[in-house]
Image (spheres, grey):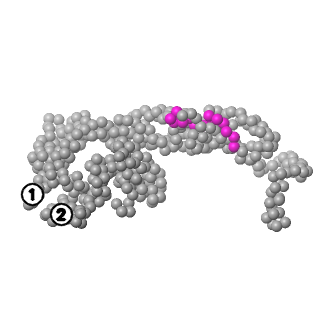
């Protein structure tokens, strides 16, 4: 694994992580580095590939065991040299075997020593695969929450053959190639190699007459509608899990899940940071200088706020509990009002005259600390 990051480090989990922890970590990292969310970022694209590669190995108990013992080389069939520097792949080649395209150690040993466990595992119930769906909601909807109906395609057990893949009136029969063992054996000297039967793929049986509806797959595509409850306070990029509504499982296994990716539209007035909301309010010079009562918009409607006399441009004031509700129910954020001084561009003659009078009045002010401090800095800069 020289030069490559450890699979556990890639997913950010410990070497004793449970399958559930690995699954959760994978979904988090895959979302973070997905090319759709990082367009043109080659580094993110490479990390996304490595995240998928790590999950493919660590989510498979057999591959994970090989990786833990031999590292990535073991997964490639070249699982390290022995004490005398002899590679196992060379040993098998020297014994007269070419390797037969084994994908990992589990395949190799299963094929050499019988491998019945792999066939039995295929017949065991397996959970169906998960599905991904995307919805887009407004800024206001993310604040209040809502129920939204979504529609998606998924696989379901074929009702015509009950998932067997065989046409009604027919059944599965013993595989003529492997005689029901699921394996094909061949011998060469001291060793005997057993490979997965290519006809039945290790099942030991084949479909005599495939179901005309599902073409022997045992599954049909269906469109499913589900009501999704979007909680108040949900943020852009968060996911909602709908348990048991994904693709049908194999051999009577449970359905997978549906993960709904929530996208939130930007708002023209408000901006969100965490659970806090920010809004900019324009004020005039007279309001800033003399103070005023200002009507401030919030997500729940307008409220009055007192603007103190002498308010400076970009002053920020806080309204408690006027932000987003925490999606986990831990209180609410705040609303921050930022006051922006508005300078008029098109002035009437009367307005110009009033400002000129103000200008003359400003010249008569003897103490202007801010201006005096500024002029002192200018003189110092030029050495005067």
* Res 349 seen here: no
Identify the residue position indicated by label 2 in the image: 91
SS of the residue at dot 1? strand
- Residue at the image position 74 percent from the left and 43 percent from the top: 283
SS of the residue at dot 2? helix
Q: Would you call the spot at circle 1 few (<14 residues within 10 Å), some (14-19), or many (20 or more)?
A: few
Q: Is residue 195 above or below residue 91?
A: above
The prevailing secondary structure element of the residues shown in magenta is: loop
Identify the residue position indicated by label 1 in the image: 187
- Residue at the image position 9 percent from the left and 57 percent from the top: 187
In three-dimensional space, the C-alpha distance between marks 1 and 2, rounded to whole angstroms, equals 16 Å
| Quarter of the image with the C terminus in it | bottom right
Magenta stretch contains residue 318: yes
Left or right of residue 308, residue 227 in this image: left
| Residue range (magenta) | 316-329
- Residue at the image position 64 percent from the left and 35 percent from the top: 320
Q: Would you call the spot at circle 2 few (<14 residues within 10 Å), some (14-19), or many (20 or more)?
A: few
Q: Nearer the viewer, mark 1 or mark 2?
A: 2
Quick one: 11 or 208, which is closer to the camera?
Answer: 11
Q: Is residue 70 above or below residue 302?
A: below
Q: Quadrant of residue 205?
A: top left
Percent x, y of residue 237 = 49, 44
Which sits earlier in the primary sequence, circle 1 or circle 2? Answer: 2
* Res 178 seen here: yes
Left or right of residue 172, residue 315 in this image: right
């Amino acid at each position: 694994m020289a030069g490559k990051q450890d699979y556990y480090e890639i997913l950010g989990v410990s070497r004793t992580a449970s399958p559930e922890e690995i699954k959760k970590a994978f979904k988090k990292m895959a979302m973070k580095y997905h090319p759709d969310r990082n367009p043109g970022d080659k580094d993110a694209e490479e990390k996304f590939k490595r995240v998928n590669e790590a999950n493919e190995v660590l989510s498979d108990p057999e591959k994970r065991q090989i990786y833990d013992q031999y590292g990535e080389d073991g997964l490639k069939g070249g699982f390290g040299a022995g004490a005398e520097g002899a590679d196992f792949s060379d040993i098998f080649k020297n014994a007269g075997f070419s390797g037969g395209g084994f994908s990992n150690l589990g395949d190799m040993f299963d094929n050499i020593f019988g491998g019945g466990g792999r066939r039995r595992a295929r017949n065991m119930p397996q959970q169906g695969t998960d599905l991904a769906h995307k919805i887009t909601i407004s800024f206001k909807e993310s604040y209040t929450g809502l129920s939204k109906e979504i529609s998606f395609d998924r696989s379901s057990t074929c009702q015509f053959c009950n998932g067997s893949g065989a046409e009604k009136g027919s059944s599965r029969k013993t595989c003529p190639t492997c005689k029901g063992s699921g394996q094909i054996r061949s011998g060469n000297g001291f060793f005997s190699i057993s490979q997965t039967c290519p006809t039945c793929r290790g099942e030991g049986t084949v479909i005599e007459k495939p179901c005309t509806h599902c073409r022997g797959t045992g599954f049909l595509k269906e469109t499913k509608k589900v009501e999704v409850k979007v909680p108040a306070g949900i943020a852009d990029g968060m996911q909602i899990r709908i348990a048991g509504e994904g693709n049908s499982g194999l051999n009577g296994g449970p359905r997978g899940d549906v993960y709904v990716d929530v996208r939130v539209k930007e708002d023209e007035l408000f901006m969100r940071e965490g659970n806090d909301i920010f809004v900019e309010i324009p004020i005039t010079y007279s309001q800033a200088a003399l103070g005023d009562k200002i009507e401030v918009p919030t997500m729940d409607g307008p409220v009055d706020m007192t603007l103190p006399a002498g308010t400076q441009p970009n002053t920020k004031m806080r309204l408690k509990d006027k932000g987003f509700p925490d999606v986990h129910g831990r209180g609410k954020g705040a609303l921050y009002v930022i006051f922006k001084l508005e300078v008029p561009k098109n002035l009437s003659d009367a307005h110009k005259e009033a400002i000129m009078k103000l200008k003359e009045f400003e010249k008569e002010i003897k103490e202007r600390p801010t201006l005096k401090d500024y002029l002192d800095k200018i003189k110092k800069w030029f050495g005067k």
